[in-house]
Image (cartoon, rainbow, N blue to C red):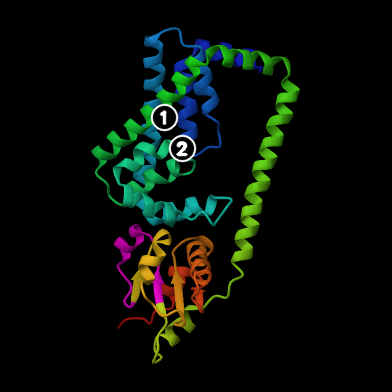
Amino acid sequence: MDLSQITESLQRDAVWVVFVNVLMQQVGLPVPVMPTLLLAGSLMAGTGQMAELLAAAVVASVFADWLWYLAGRAFGYKVLSGLCKLSINPGSCVTQTEARFVRWGLASLVVAKFIPGFSTVAPPIAGALRMNLAGFVVAAGIGAALWAGLTLWAGWLLRYEVQTAIAYLDRHMSTAAMVVVAILAIWLCWKLWQKYRFRSLAGLPHITPAELLAAMQAEQTPLFLDLRGPTIVARTGHIAGATAAELDRLSEAVGNWPRERPIVTMCACPGDATAIEAARRLLDAGYLSVRPLKGGYEAWLANQPARR
């Protein structure tokens, strides 16, 4: 199907095309939606059609967010951890996003659609944190309306430019395909470089749970930073002797700790990503001995003595 056929299909079934495209993209499939909304906006004949397209986009978006909300409510941190594992860059751990979500509250859902990656993570976090469903739907609806409405309106304002671009691409399809492939290749190389960089950083010396348990029995125990997100902390409780911390607020957590005192960082994300990043930042800040806990919270939990 060439671009002219796609345009004709969009003119004929614009509402359904927008609904399906937005739904697929919002449930997490790698389907581009911005070009569809821009093109649909450029083809609008009047305000009535604008309202229909906007309603289709909002309903699809809120429905997908509701599904993610239910998944987060049912499975909690497992959903968030799974999303983090699917990321091509493990360093972008969901724990950091979760901390920002808790800090911003409902307002984060309004802006989520404008932040790549965050729009997928925010709804399950809301569910895992047992956010009020009515408030969640309203905030998600407002965010979807702003996101889709602005994109459709931009398509209408730039309708002549969009149509000119479509006509140009239709005449130079092979060139356009090569440009798209080149852009995707550059993006993939960038993500792979980030992954390589994270693995290089992960070479930082770790401490095992057994070594940490032994160190905590010594006269001078190491300082223990718990970088788990609020969702898992709320479900499993605080760890005795540990100081809760956020990656973006490390200086507040460590306070006036002696720089020669050993520090252990722990998170509950794939690859110990947040713990490694925190250790790096503290070492750069002048702390002499900072080690991430190998295996994170799951390994720590597995090594706890059995209670009688």
Can you see residue 280?
Answer: yes
Residue 232 on the magenta span: yes
Q: Is residue 259 above or below residue 218?
A: above
What is the span of residues highlighted in magenta in the rendered image?
Answer: 224-241
Q: Report if the CB atoms under discs 2 and 1 are less than 8 Å apart.
A: no
Residue at image point 74% right, 30% down: 178
Residue at image point 42% right, 24% down: 150
Where the N terminus falls, by quadrant? Answer: top right
Residue at image point 70% right, 34% down: 181
Q: Nearer the viewer, mark 2 or mark 1?
A: 1
Q: Position of residue 260 (x, y in %)?
A: 47, 82
Residue at image point 37% right, 55% down: 99
Mark number, residue 27: 2
Q: Position of residue 172 (x, y in %)?
A: 73, 18
Amino acid residing under circle 2: Val
Residue 5 on the magenta span: no
Can you see residue 73?
Answer: no
- SS at circle 2: loop
